[in-house]
Image (tube, rainbow, N blue to C red):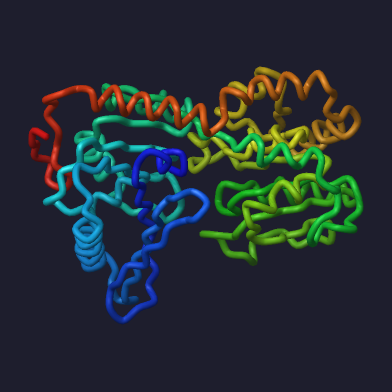
């Protein structure tokens, strides 16, 4: 979105915060990117359909006040259909399908129905990974796999930064690290067993705990739960790791994920070990850029190999060459080109968001 903001106004509509007695919008422009972040604030009682109606009114208010005409409506979740005003006719509708949200813990029961509606009216569909594209390719005639990119320069800093930073400073080595959301997608049993069998290894776990009980996290002297960290500080933590890991569980919630942390770890110059997530095995495992391990014994063996061999110059050169195609600039360039091609379709019939009818725009 920061790249789109260089040539267009971008309004990024966030999830609502339930902390007000009456609905209001908080609108602020990010000084470094130009993206205009819009945060709706609602009363605690405004849930379900009542909340959707308030959000719809607030969005319509924003569109009027900001003089927004012929917008490109970009959906990250089909549930946003409920709060999009019927009276607004976008010039194009983009569905950026980053995950199979219906398989996540606590997903709304209506999400599949909403996705069917969104796929019916969308002009252009992107998927956050190849496996997700393969699962949905027959559902739309203009769908494209666009795996998440990586801020190459940001994470490459880790290769030259000091090895000690923050709470992990002074921890014994080796250090195996993870950075990301800590939820039902992580294999906590795998982490615990590996940590028990290798008590001399330190496991640094960075990220917020969501949708699972914090009490379910394994508490061992060599597992360090550091919580959420600022994006700007991640390379500083990565610099102090010996191995980066992606200990994902193999369940419904991980069936179609394409972890953004894979290229981030590689940019940092770290050896990476992952459970056999499809979009990690293909292409990273097949190219020898990531070690794949499923069981605790395999995870330990892969870690020991990584600790012995490290990352040679030849490996880094291969990884860097592959990562060139995954920069956010390259991802944005492709998306922007596809949107431009669709916009060039003069006189196309475009649907009205919300009720499924069509209008010529």
From the top left corner, tell me how far across and down residue 216 is, in percent. 64, 62
Relative side of 225 to 23, left or right: right
Say if 62 sits above or below 343 in the image: below
Task: Give left or right: position of 111 versus 222.
Answer: left
Could you tell me residue 188's position as x and y percent?
67, 51
Quadrant in which the C terminus is drawn = top left
Residue 103 x/y as whole percent: 42, 44
Left or right: 305 in relation to 83:
right
The quadrant of the rendering that contains the N terminus is top left
User: Looking at this view, is 56 or 286 the one in front?
Assistant: 56
At x 64%, y 33%, the residue is: 263
Identify which residue is drawn at 38% across, 29% down.
Answer: 336
Number of disc labels? 0
Q: Residue at x 90, y 58 (%)?
A: 170
Residue 286 picture quarter: top right
Taking the spot 72% from the left edge, 37% from the top edge, the residue there is 156
- Rendered view: 108 above or below 345: below
In-image side of 242 versus 260 (left or right): right
Q: Which residue occupies the foreground of this view, 35 or 159?
A: 35
Q: Residue furthest bottom?
A: 21
Q: Nearer the viewer, residue 104 or 88?
A: 88
| Residue 210 placement: quadrant | bottom right
Q: Is residue 115 shown above or below 38? A: above
């Amino acid at each position: 979105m920061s790249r789109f903001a260089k040539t267009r106004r971008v309004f990024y509509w966030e999830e609502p915060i339930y902390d007000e007695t009456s609905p209001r919008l908080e609108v602020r422009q990010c000084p470094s990117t130009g993206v205009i972040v819009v945060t709706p604030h609602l009363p605690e009682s405004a849930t379900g359909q009542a909340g959707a109606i308030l959000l719809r009114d607030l969005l319509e208010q924003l569109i009027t006040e900001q003089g927004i005409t012929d917008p490109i409506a970009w959906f990250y979740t089909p549930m946003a259909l409920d709060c999009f005003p019927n009276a607004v006719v976008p010039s194009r509708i983009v569905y950026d399908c980053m995950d199979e949200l219906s398989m996540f813990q606590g997903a709304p029961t209506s999400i599949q129905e909403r996705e069917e509606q969104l796929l019916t009216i969308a002009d252009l569909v992107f998927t956050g990974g190849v496996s997700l594209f393969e699962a949905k390719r027959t559902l739309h005639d203009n769908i494209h796999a666009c795996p998440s990119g990586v801020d190459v320069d940001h994470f490459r800093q880790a290769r030259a930064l000091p090895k000690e930073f923050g709470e992990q400073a002074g921890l014994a080595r080796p250090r195996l690290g993870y950075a990301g959301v800590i939820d039902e997608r992580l294999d906590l049993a795998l982490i615990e067993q590996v940590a028990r069998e290798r008590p001399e290894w330190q496991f640094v776990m960075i990220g917020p705990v969501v949708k699972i009980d914090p009490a379910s996290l394994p508490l061992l002297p060599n597992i360090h739960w550091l919580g959420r960290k600022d994006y700007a500080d991640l390379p500083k933590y990565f610099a102090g790791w010996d191995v980066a890991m992606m200990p994902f569980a193999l369940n419904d919630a991980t069936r179609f994920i394409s972890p953004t942390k894979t290229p981030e770890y590689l940019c940092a110059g770290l050896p990476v070990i992952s459970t056999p997530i499809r979009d990690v095995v293909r292409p990273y495992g097949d190219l020898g850029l990531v070690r794949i391990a499923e069981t605790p014994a395999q995870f330990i063996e892969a870690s020991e190999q990584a600790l012995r061999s490290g990352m040679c110059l030849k490996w880094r050169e291969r990884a860097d060459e592959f990562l060139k195609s995954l920069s956010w600039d390259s991802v944005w360039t492709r998306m922007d080109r596809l949107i431009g091609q669709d916009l060039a379709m003069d006189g196309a019939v475009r649907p009205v968001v919300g009720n499924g009818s069509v209008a010529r725009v």
